[in-house]
Image: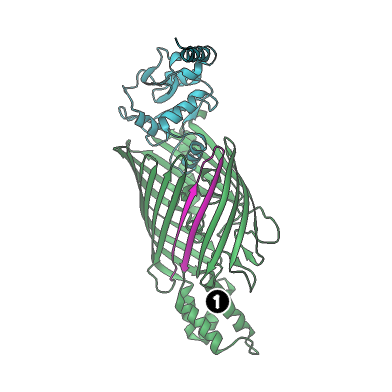
Amino acid sequence: MSGRNFSRAITLLVSLLFIPWAWADLAIIVHPDNPQQSISKHQLRLIFLGRMPLFPASGEEIIAFDLPESDSGYETFYRNVVELEGTRLKRYRAYYLFSGRGKLPRPTDSNAAILQQVADNERAIGYVDSRLVNEKVKVLLTLPER
Amino acid sequence: MFRFRCLALISLLWPILTTAGMSSEDWQVSGFTSLGLGRMQEPGLEFLGYDNEKWRAKGDSVLGLQLNADLAERLSMTLQVVSRGYNQDDTDSFEPELDWLFLSYHLNSAWRVRIGRMRTPHYLYSETVDVGYSYVWARPPIDVYSTILSTFSYFDGADIRYLTHSNHVDIDLQLFSGYMKRSRDNLEIKVEPMIGGNISLQWEQWKLRYGLIYDRTDIRLQPTANFASNLDAVIAFDSSYQSVKDALNADDAWYRYQTLGLHWDGEAVAIISEVFDIRNTDDGFQNDAHGWYLSAHMPLGKFTPYLVRGAFTNEYNLDAFATVNNSLQSFPTGQPGYEGFDTFRLQALDRLELNNYAQSTWTLGLRYDLMSNVALKAEWQRFDFHSNSSGQITQNAQDASSHAALTTLIIDVVF
């Protein structure tokens, strides 16, 4: 192993040890009874921008849940899926909410809160750290962290 | 009648609100506020209540509260109350106004209907014009978001919206119809019906929007206004002044509003441009207008500098101008015993000039996102006046400048 590769391996190991959350995949989850079996990245973008109000499979109204802004999963999701971040995202959300078009995703305070909401509500959809997924929810899509 | 219909609408909603058995999760309360300071550089000019005497705070200051409630599956209600420091119509400063109150129902994944009070969707930012946080500028460019349309900011009626997605293009179609009635500057303005629609195409970083509205507008001088009664007396004295009266009234005239907007939201630079055209079918109240702006802003982390260029023209009835000017030439002011007539003629000229103007603007500004829900803005705007007018700026002095500059500092918050 060359010196450069060894250095990279050490860096990776340290990252995994001290900031494991930065490497977590995101799982898109719904209630197990939701007839929706899959979902595309484009559909997710529309849902979290408020442009798709109903589940395509069931016609049920969607209630989307957000991680807190302080959670790295929030930024990862909006950067990679919704393709908006930072001030552009905040301006868009203010525009959307106050223009009478609809509601924003409901904020939560943790991955556990989203898992609970989705487990309790057939109309819910959310994104969580894929390592935390349990049998009370159904995974529609897993998104690599990057 | 207007307030009565609003109350009637609320009373219709009330049983639904009180019997829906909603939990707290079904309610979302949010709000926005802006506190602005502004000062004109030149004396004798006024815009949004800003002048040269001192820094004033009412022009852009606003507080809004919004309630979203899920009433039943696919059925929701939105209510928004806004209190503005400066109003273009006869509403008192900071008097709360009901801007949104509607029921919304999703027929399926593509179609949604709304009924109630809604903001009139003239332009890209018409529906959030009071929500400073939602755009980069201190206020939307006034060459398009002009003061003449502020009176028509909301309507009571219904709309239907079609939203679909094809080949990664979002297609958003809105059709609406309704009515409105308000008063401003001794004018009673009634629009019934207002019929319109707009279509937006959005793909990747591009958004293209076209809007078309037809409305039948009745504009009349309030009979109680001194000017109106004086005008009738002058017409009895000189019948040629009938053209002045015609110019100050629109008798169920059909107006056509057309708008075209383009937004390119690039990561390094964003471009927004809109152009509009208003045509009136009434020969008397020839209130045709057109304007445009081109705005560029560059996100640099929390800082967003921006530059805007725009122009605006509003054309009023030229025959009425000629009548007053001919009268002033053939019968100059200052004749003993005709002081009242002189005052009236100068008032008439002021009223006509108030609505016959052209201007162009340069705007330079900086937005700084202080916190996740707080933005600070500093803006400098230069107005150049054309057609011997003072543009959308109110002229309080006889010898005002051919240009003006306005400096604005604003803090915008959403919560």
Q: Identify the residue at horizontal 54%, vertical 89% (top origin).
A: B330
Evaluate whether residue B117 shows in this view: no
Side (left or right) of B109 relative to A113: left
| Magenta segment | B286-314
Q: Identify the residue at horizontal 41%, vertical 46% (top origin).
A: B115
Q: Which chain is cyan?
A: A
Which residue is at the far front?
A2
Q: Is residue B54 magenta?
A: no
Q: Chain of mark 1?
A: B
Q: Which chain is green?
A: B
The kind of residue on which mark 1 rests is: Leu
- Report the number of numbered marks: 1
Name the residue that disc number 1 marks.
B349
Evaluate whether residue A112 shows in this view: yes
Residue B8: x and y in percent read 47, 49
Residue A105: x and y in percent read 46, 31
Which residue is at the far left?
B167
Residue A99: x and y in percent read 47, 44
Side (left or right) of B10 relative to B412: left
Q: Which quadrant would the N terminus of chain A be assigned to in this image?
A: top left
Circle 1 SS class: helix
Q: Nearer the viewer, residue B72 or A23?
A: A23
Residue A80: x and y in percent read 42, 29
Asked which quadrant contains residue B279, the reply is bottom left
Q: Is residue B313 magenta?
A: yes
